[in-house]
Amino acid sequence: MKVLVPVKRVVDFNVKVRVKSDGSGVDIANVKMSMNPFDEIAVEEATRLKEGGKVTEVVAVSCGVTQCQETLRTAMAIGADRGILVETDTELQPLAVAKLLKAVADKEQPQLIILGKQAIDDDCNQTGQMLAALLGWPQATFASKVMLEDGKATVTREVDGGLETIALTLPAVVTTDLRLNEPRYVTLPNIMKAKKKQLDTVKPADLGVDVAPRLKTLKVSEPPKRSAGITVPDAAALVAKLKNEAKVI
Ligand code: AMP
């Protein structure tokens, strides 16, 4: 059974992004880029399913600029068997990515697609859901446990106030939550091995997909600055302020 894992190249989570002076977006020139953390969890999960004998092949897919090859190599160093780059310089929005992934899925015929629940750059949380709709497949979002048995996936989801367990008939789409697993540390020998794995490149036009943006960003701005704190002389003054000014007690 084949698993497809879409991986997005995003600004590294440790980078403090700066808004461009014209408010048109954030400045990503010369900024460290990495795999979206939720996608690392997805690759780790697919790799563990393969190591557990439930899966035979893990294919990583990334849509975007040429440098997404690095993201695919990281996925292959974690455990993906091969990679597919859908190469384009056009800024991709979730609907375009979902259409590209549907076209790849039509070709590759995976039984399971594991995506991150959201990309940390756009925070959209849309691609997995749109992909499931386009494919007409069942979906389980925010997975904290995935089990495969007899053509079915049993997925535990984190919901308000507890856990929900659902059964899905394969093929299906799953999106990862933070607690699904802790991705392994990528070792140097595995980075070297990943360099030799197969990486194919296709263009959106080869897949018959129009990736033109449908949404226009009107403005990006910094969050308001936090105002400075104050020092109170003693506990009594603190309690008085919490009671009379902040009105929280
Ligand atoms: P989003 O809907 O943008 O928050 O992204 C959710 C998930 O969709 C990500 O965690 C990835 O698994 C996948 N995804 C989004 N954009 C891309 C992309 N350009 N290439 C590959 N996968 C993507």
Image (cartoon, rainbow, N blue to C red):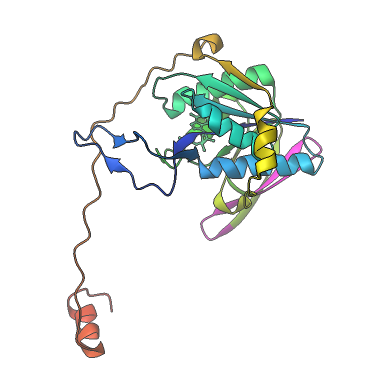
Q: Which residues are magenta?
A: 145-162
Q: Position of residue 234 (x, y in %)?
A: 23, 89
- Residue found at x 49% / y 22%: 66
Viewer-nearest residue: 192 or 25 = 192
Where on the picture, by quarter, is residue 106? top right
Work out whether 162 lies above or below 171.
Answer: below
Q: Main secondary structure of the magenta part?
A: strand
Q: Position of residue 164 (x, y in %)?
A: 62, 53
| Quadrant housing residue 52 | top right
Is 61 covered by the magenta stretch? no
Q: Is residue 152 visible?
A: yes
Displayed quadrant of residue 25: top left
- Quadrant placement of the C terminus: bottom left
Report the residue at 29% width, 26% height from top.
216
Q: How many numbered marks are there?
A: 0
Residue 22, x across and y down, in percent: 19, 33
160 drawn magenta: yes
Q: Position of residue 125 (x, y in %)?
A: 46, 39
